[in-house]
Image (cartoon, rainbow, N blue to C red):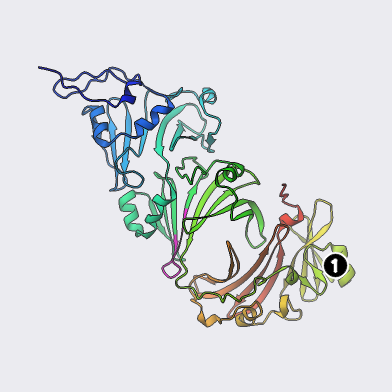
Amino acid sequence: MKKKIIIIPMFLLSMTLFIVGCNNANTNVNNNSISIYYPDVIDLMSMSKDEVFDWWGGNYIKIPSDGERIEKYRDIKNHMIIYFSDLVNSEKIDSIEFEDAVDINGIRVGMAYSELEKALPKDYTKGVDGTIQFMYNDFYITIVPVSYEDTEVALIKIARSIHLKSIQPLSEMSMEDLVRNYGGDYNLYDDGTENYVNGYFGFTLERWGDSLQYYSIYFPKDSFSNDCRMDISGARVGLSNKEILNILGEPFFQGQFIQGDNMIPIGELLVYEILEGQVCFYSYERGGDCYSVEYHNWVADNFIKPDAKIKEDIFNLSDCEIGRVKLGDTDKQVRKIKGEPQSIDDWYFDGKVYGYDSVEYCFVNSDADELILNQIIFTTDQTQGPRGIKVGDSINDVVSKFYSNYTIEEMAYDKLWNLYDNGYFVRGFIGFNYASGEIDRILYSYLDKENTVSLKIDIENGIVIKMVLNKCLADMELFPWDA
């Protein structure tokens, strides 16, 4: 009886993979080692399901996957797992995991990590758990260690990169459908936020409640792994901001991003307007490696749109000067204007708090060993704050002073409300306590190349109980922002 000949894609002939000779449709693989070079990856990942099955010659089983729209097959003889999914390319391989003897351009399963560096390309990134990742063409190659000690390579994975346009349609699915179709984990938080995390594809989808209609897609390089498959025109997690700028060009915004009421700078942010939303690249330092990419889409159908005539200076530097004292002044300047303080207490960063009747002036110690005014805190109605607002005023009193032409009664009380949005940065918003459903704060902010200032107003039962004027600590070189 004649042997049945299986047609093998040409790229497989360049591998030291097998010599095929089969009888009664049974394929024999005469070599346990798979050796390929980077150009072969493109051909390998272009295989269809039928071509894979022919290649394996019946020596495979289908194994359970996390989602109905992800198929997972194991090659028994060569110890590899191949995935198919409709998310990126329903016709071709989505990813391959090699668990045994494989050599990809000199990188081998079982290889000691101490030997890896000479085999890696220059543009690889490494997670804190030792996971290494780099791209070839449109594919991610991920190297997973046996343990956190980076003893040797346990797994090599080749996966298609994921473009934002492939992920966007998922925002319209219910969280239950996402888990059923693509696996992952789903959480519903007390404030109504829906959070979906997919470890296989390497992204997180987050929605903030039904009425707000807001969603974000995150591609994080998280604390324990560097396995991320996002690709936006070549820009991705792990590249430096300089590399991202070279790829995508001039951003919509480039600058610091901050955290907390004290506005402590955390790192650098690049923002691009892409696909009717904004893509943000975050790094922990200026020009540093990107650790997270986020896509934000704001659907504001349920917002009352601010009037186009609202002035752009909803809050500005002139609002940070109270009685000739302004944020950034030294303690000597403040003493000259206000006289000696009635009380002096310790403050953050070896600073001091000077008490004058109803106002506290909070100073931090600068690199020049000077006390610099960081905050002005109002706790009584004896002293007026910016634009004449004071403790005891109503919410409408506050909003009316900052150029808003609508009242609080027009707002939805169970969600975040933007008073004014200047491009990417929300310059004014009202915050709600999700437990009580009541407004508990109003925050105005201003940012330019040299200054980042804010006014935080605490609210209780609709009345102002405290106001804090604040200057970003980076402006005082406590957190240097070197060019």
Q: Does 286 sit above or below residue 148?
A: below
Q: Does 220 sit above or below residue 437?
A: above
403 left or right, relative to 50: right
- Residue 182 is at least partly visible in this image: yes
Q: Amino acid at mark 1?
A: Val
- Residue 380 is at least partly visible in this image: no
Choose between 289 and 261: the one closer to the eye.
289
The verdict on residue 257 being magenta is no
Label 1 element class:
helix
Q: What x and y, as percent, mark residue 130?
A: 51, 34
Kindly identify the residue that appears in the image at 67 percent across and 74 percent down. Answer: 466
Residue range in magenta is 207-217
463 left or right, relative to 163: right
Q: What x and y, as percent, mark residue 386?
A: 72, 75
Q: What x and y, as percent, mark residue 196?
A: 41, 54
Kindly identify the residue that appears in the image at 48 percent across and 32 percent down. Answer: 147
Choose between 90 and 222: the one closer to the eye.
90
Q: What residue sits right under mark 1 in the picture?
A: 334
The verdict on residue 209 being magenta is yes
Q: What x and y, as percent, mark residue 426?
A: 59, 65
